[in-house]
Image (cartoon, rainbow, N blue to C red):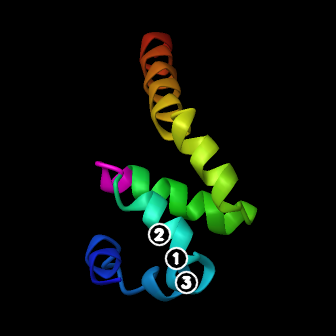
Amino acid sequence: MMLFAERFSDVEILPTLSAKLSWSHIIELLPLKSKEAQLFYAEDVTQHNLGVHELRRQISRKTFERREIANTGLKKDLLRLN
């Protein structure tokens, strides 16, 4: 829990996340290297009420990374249009 509190130190989101995430969810999130990825998946769990199995599936499918790649492509396309 200390590592969780350290990684998710934002006082505004910590109480919400700690109340909505199970210990199993937290164990899945801690090994992620990027703080942005951890936050993305944690918010995804809370918004969509995902179980641990679905969280593992989202992480293994690299949902965060794929979203980032898609967003980068959209930004480049928008810049070309301007």
Dot 2: within a 10 Å radius of its alpha carbon, few (fewer than 14), some, or many (20 or more) residues? some
Q: Position of residue 55 (x, y in %)?
A: 61, 53
Identify the residue under disc 3. 16
**Is 35 one of the magenta-colored residues?**
yes
Question: Which one is closest to the eye, mark 3 or mark 1?
Answer: 1
Three-letter amino acid code of the residue under disc 3: Thr
Q: Is residue 55 above or below residue 71?
A: below
Q: Is residue 80 above or below residue 75?
A: above
Residue range corresponding to the magenta coloring: 32-36
Q: Position of residue 14 (x, y in %)?
A: 43, 83
Q: Are marks 2 and 1 in contact (CB under 8 Å)?
A: yes
> Which secondary structure lies at badge 1?
helix
Identify the residue under disc 1. 23
Q: Residue at x 52, y 25 (%)?
A: 70
In 3D space, how far apart are the residues under numbered discs 2 and 3 (Cα atoms)? 13 Å
**Is 38 one of the magenta-colored residues?**
no
Three-letter amino acid code of the residue under disc 1: Trp
> Which secondary structure lies at badge 3?
helix
